[in-house]
């Protein structure tokens, strides 16, 4: 029921790249239920196709990704947790970026989209207005951001029948 990946593995779930010293995949009834990223854990979500330089980021000593019905339902970062979130208005207009650090960060998802973010314990944060962020998005990246990698294309399995 558990598969452990070691030596700085990288994996993708939906549009979220996960990277850490080791990653444990917890299965239940042949379905992925949880991902535990341990040691220098990092998630990077590219959900803005119009502005590809903007990536939502989360880091911590450990990050747990909870999955229900093959969709992320929450992400929990613990131990020196940090987040970078690019803000959008309800009309989709960029409004800047928010950087936060604390003990624990909980991101809850609704139908695959971030619904709420909760920062717990020793919260420090900064909000940068759009006029400061525009054209300089990568300067706001969290420390330890992994290199951008394209999500691998799913390969079609070919079976040969004899």
Image (cartoon, grey):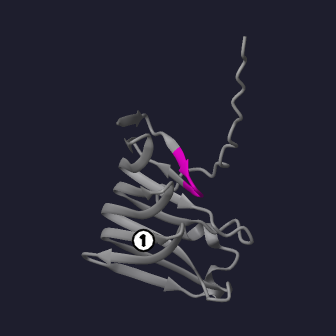
Mark 1 crowdedness (10 Å alpha carbons): few <14, some 14-19, many ≥20? some
Residue 68 location in percent, x, y?
44, 58
Q: Is residue 13 magenta?
A: yes
Name the residue beneath numbered marker 1: 108
Q: Residue at x 45, y 39 (%)?
A: 8
* Residue positioned 69% across, 30% down in the render: 157
Q: Quadrant of the C terminus?
A: top right
Secondary structure under tag 1 reads strand
User: What is the residue that sits farthest to the front in this orientation?
Assistant: 162
At x 45%, y 55%, the residue is 42
Front-most of 86 and 136? Answer: 86
Q: Main secondary structure of the magenta part?
A: strand
Residue farthest top in this picture: 162
Spot the residue most to the left: 121
**The N terminus - image quarter:** top left
Percent position of residue 126, x then y: 44, 83
Image: 49 above or below 1: below
Q: Is 77 placed above or below 140 here?
A: above
Q: Which residues are magenta?
A: 11-16
- Does the magenta run of residues contain 37? no
Q: Residue 75: horizontal and vertical position, in percent?
A: 41, 62
Judged left or right of residue 2, residue 126 is right
Please name whichever residue, 123 or 76, is drawn nearer the observer in this view of the structure: 76
**Which quarter of the picture shows residue 112?**
bottom right
Q: Position of residue 118 (x, y in %)?
A: 36, 77
Tell me: residue 49, above or below residue 62. below
* 10 in relation to 125, above or below: above
Q: Say which of 155 and 28 sits in front.
A: 28
Residue at position x 51%, y 43% in the image = 10
Number of numbered discs present? Answer: 1
């Amino acid at each position: 029921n558990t598969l452990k990946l070691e030596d700085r593995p990288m994996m993708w779930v939906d549009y979220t790249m996960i990277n850490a010293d080791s990653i444990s995949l917890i299965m239940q009834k042949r379905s992925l239920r949880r991902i535990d990223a341990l040691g220098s854990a990092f998630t990077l979500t590219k959900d803005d196709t119009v502005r590809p330089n903007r990536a939502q980021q989360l880091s911590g000593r450990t990050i747990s990704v909870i999955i229900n019905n093959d969709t992320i339902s929450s992400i929990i970062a613990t131990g020196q947790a940090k987040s970078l979130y690019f803000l959008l208005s309800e009309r989709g207009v960029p409004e800047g970026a928010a950087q936060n650090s604390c003990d624990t960060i909980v991101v809850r998802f609704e139908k695959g989209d971030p619904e709420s973010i909760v920062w717990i314990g020793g919260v420090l944060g900064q909000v940068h207005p759009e006029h400061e962020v525009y054209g300089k998005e990568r300067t706001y990246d969290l420390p330890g951001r992994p290199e951008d990698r394209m999500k691998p294309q799913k390969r079609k399995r070919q079976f040969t029948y004899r």
